[in-house]
Image (cartoon, rainbow, N blue to C red):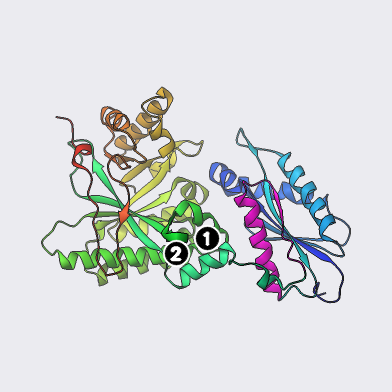
Amino acid sequence: ADLRDGDTAHSLLYLDLDRFKVVNDSGGHDAGDALLRNLGPVIAGQLRAGDTLARIGGDEFGIVLVNCPLEQAERIAECIRTELAALPFAWGGASFAIGASIGVLPVHACSGSLADVVRAADAACYQAKESGGNGVHVERGGRRPVAQSRAVLPPSTRLCQAVENAEFQLFAQPIVSLQPRTPARQRFEILLRLPGKAGQMQDAAEFLPMAERHRLMPAIDRWVVRESIAALGSWHRAHPNAAQPWCSINLSASAVDDDSLVPFIEQLIAANDLPADTFCFEFAESTVLSNLARTVRVMYGLQDAGCRLGVDDVGSTPTSLSYLESLPLDYLKIGGWFVRDLADDPACARIVSAINQIGLSMGMVSIAKHVDSERVLQELRLLDVGLAQGRIIAPPERFTHSDGRVTIPSPTMQACGCPS
């Protein structure tokens, strides 16, 4: 039945788990699936006969509360939130605290289309998450149509528009050599940004989790790859005698399920007349561990195409690094949380040293990211880490410009000297 018929008050809850990604990244999809199986009975235990619970996708749930005024819906949402916050969940010897952000929306004859209702409930959930998470946000839109009651578009809608209208911007950050053995070829990583209010730029970490939830990552991956390769091709044509720099591009977890991605990359590289080893494609360690077989297949496809390969955030999950032996890697990128505290925490120094030595023993070069102080830079040199990037070396800067210019970033000279 259409809940918007008649004058009866109904309610819709839109629930998004707050720390589901932490569970998935730490324990893989098996852990995430186990958590979701545990959640169902807990949520259902707070509902009334006749209410409907459905998984919308990923870590999002919709709950239809029939014949339920807004005040009662808010109480039900708060009970669900409390139960989930108290739910114990352990996996692989680690314990996780689970929370939920819940949007509560009244539904009646003046609520607009079904699509309007769902979008407004999603936006209410987003407000709960933006307020710190583990909370309930009630949308009290009165009897106006939901689509007209919000002055701004829900974040997921804005992201869809950004994808459709190519509103993203590419930035780049230099990667420098720390050791004499590491070739001094110019290197940088491509970083994705989204223009926000008043000209501010959103970092990828702020919007990519939502892009993943709404299945926008395949389109974003392809846009980044296409624009990056085209930009390097344009730069090469403008500087035919300059040494070709080395460019690192991150690929999301969805890339390992895209059978046409490798041919797509090969065609772009060939069309721009670039050497394939100009590009290093990076996969997050969590992606590798959650889908090792498919990641290996994609990596070998990229290797056969002549590209270089790397794993990002190595050491971010509590697991053995033996998986590295099965991958055709050129580089390891060490998790930034270890690097930041390197100069002050001996445990971090030992972890960085161990990852670096494992990489060297397998013929791989390590990159330390988030290098933000001269002390950390000096420690990395002493630990024999090959490459580094961070704000002490150079902050990210615009890679592509509206007038078609391409800027290859340069490090500060003081930061990139090698020991004698």
Residue 211's tag is: 1
Q: In which quarter of the image is residue 324?
A: top left
Image quarter of residue 202 = bottom left
The quadrant of the picture occupied by the C terminus is: top left
Say what amino acid the circle numbered 1 marks: Ala
Q: What residue type is labelled 2?
A: Ile
Q: What stretch is highlighted in magenta?
A: 113-142
**Does residue 327 appear anywhere in the picture?**
no
For the point 36% across and 42% down, the residue is 333
Q: Can residue 402 be seen in this view?
A: yes
Q: Dot 2 corresponds to which residue?
A: 220
Q: Tally the marks.
A: 2
Name the outermost residue toward the front.
198
SS state under label 1: helix
Residue toward you, 65 or 127: 127
Question: Looking at the image, which is closer to me, 216 or 194?
Answer: 194
Q: Which of 232 and 67 is in front in this view?
A: 67
- Residue count near mark 1 (Cα–Cα under 10 Å), binned few <14, some 14–19, many ≥20: many
> Relative to 313, does residue 247 appear above or below in the rendering?
below
- Quarter of the image containing the N terminus? bottom right
Instruction: Tell me which residue sits at (85%, 67%) in the image.
Output: 9
Image-based side of 414 in relation to 141, left or right: left
- The spot of residue 203 in percent (x, y) is 44, 53
Q: Earlier in the sequence, mark 1 or mark 2?
A: 1
Q: How crowded is mark 2: few (under 14 residues within 10 Å), some or many (20 or more)?
A: many
Q: Where is residue 224 in the image (x, y as percent from the top left)?
A: 38, 63
Relative to residue 40, is residue 148 drawn left or right?
Answer: left
Is residue 134 covered in magenta?
Answer: yes
Q: Does the magenta portion include 377?
A: no
At a point 21% along the width and 64% down the height, the residue shown is 235
